[in-house]
Amino acid sequence: MDVYLDNNATTVVDPKVFEEMKPFFCDIYGNPNSLHKFGAGTHPKMVEALDFLYEGINAADEDDIIITGNATESNNTVIKGIWVDKILKGDKNHVITSEVEHPAITAACKFLETQGVEVTYLPVNEEGVLEASKVKEFIREDTALVTIMWANNETGKIFPIKEIGQICKVAGVAFHSDGTQAIGKVPVDVQDCNLDYLSFSAHKFHGPKGVGGLYVKKGSELTPLLHGGEQMGGKRAGTVDVASMVGMGWAMHLATSTMAIAYEKNHVSKLRDKLENAILELPETIVIGGKDNRTPNTTLISIRGVEGESMLWDLNQKGIGASTGSACASEDLEANPVMNAFGSDSELAHTGVRFSLSRFNTEEQIDYAIDVIVNAVKRLRGISSSYAYAPQSHKSEL
Ligand SMILES: Cc1ncc(COP(=O)(O)O)c(CNc2co[nH]c2=O)c1O
């Protein structure tokens, strides 16, 4: 049986989304910017897609949503646009972010540092969550941007975006959130959170890969990352991938409308809890960051004595897909930086396995996964010299 439990990395395209995308490959294939009927034929479904996107994040009509290639591009557009408009051309020189952001934020901030910008990487608490008070403590007169993720891709921990938005509003500082792991899992309301910018990526909520969005509040427009044609009103040059844009709109519509069933009615969180609790029955296992305040589909579990990569290999042999953290960082065998940020010891940071579910997982799949995981842990611990010689409880460490 194949069981896909790595939905924070990417998700299957919802069949309904795929159906809505199909006409735009061989039937309605005009360039949206062409003046003839072949181009104009794409417009109704593009408008529908934008309506779905605005509705899904509660954007105001006067605000903008720019179609990008992915969340990485959306994040870079904000951070480099702020650099150009408020730092190079303005009197600011400081950016605030957190220690546990995705590399799409951290690497862009590191680039700014190479250009002389000061960046504050705020620490998270022992549960892996940034406390809003930290933002207030470090905001300065010359702070150009606060950028904090809505939900962490490895732990699922949800950050206090509404509180941080209020702090930024009072301080008059631009506020961006990387909403990639929140859309379709928890309610996202850009107006309620005083956001100037929000990034998202369709393939995280059952849309196609290679298309994302950037919400821009009216009055917070930035210098574009990509210059060229007049697409998106010149805010993001390049011919729009119409099929993917339509797909992202429908994915947003389905993800946010089914959330009340799939998530808030606890379908997904019930399956996540069943999987998590079964693993926690094993000795020396712990949920990294604890169980509170998480997206309903994610669990990052440390299994002492079992290297994360070894576990993934065993699971893969039995048809189960999971991860040790962000696929973007999975290739190297360095300790998980997010777990390091919690102050986890090196061994613990190497023993994390992330399971991230979706509305397409079933109870039968979870029952099968539990059986495979329990047997894999027994096998791997049985052949582990270190575990055999140094069993120790680390529950007090986190
Ligand atoms: C919070 C967050 N931001 C940005 C990105 C980048 O999205 P993309 O540009 O569409 O690729 C990811 C992808 N996160 C993961 C990719 O693989 N495993 C993950 O956890 C993410 O989790």
Image (cartoon, rainbow, N blue to C red):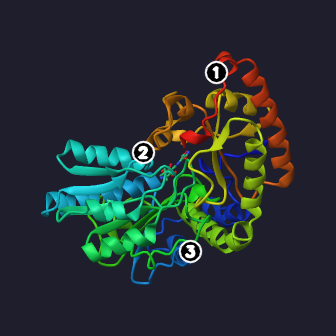
Q: Label 3: how many residues lie within 10 Å, few (<14), some (14-19) or many (20+)?
A: many
Cα–Cα gap, marks 2 and 3: 25 Å
| 301 relative to 166 in the view: left or right | right
Return the residue nearer the eye: 398 or 52.
398
Q: Label 1: how many residues lie within 10 Å, few (<14), some (14-19) or many (20+)?
A: few
Q: Mark 2: which amino acid? A: Pro
Q: Can the viewer see residue 235?
A: no
Mark on residue 103?
A: 2
Dot 2 lies on which element?
A: helix
Which badge, 2 or 1, is on the more N-terminal residue?
2
The quadrant of the rendering that contains the N terminus is top right
Mark on residue 56?
A: 3
Q: Mark 3: which amino acid? A: Gly
Which badge, 1 or 3, is on the more N-terminal residue?
3
Report if the beta carbon of the residue with label 2 is closer than 8 angstroms to ligand 1. Answer: yes
Q: Can the viewer see residue 14?
A: yes
> Which quarter of the figure has residue 56?
bottom right
Name the residue at 44% across, 67% down: 161
Return the residue nearer the eye: 145 or 217.
145
Dot 1 lies on which element?
A: loop
Q: Label 2: how many residues lie within 10 Å, few (<14), some (14-19) or many (20+)?
A: some
| 219 relative to 164 in the view: left or right | left
Name the residue at 53% across, 34% down: 349
Mark 2 vs mark 1, foreground winner is 1
| 338 relative to 206 in the view: left or right | left
Dot 3 lies on which element?
A: helix
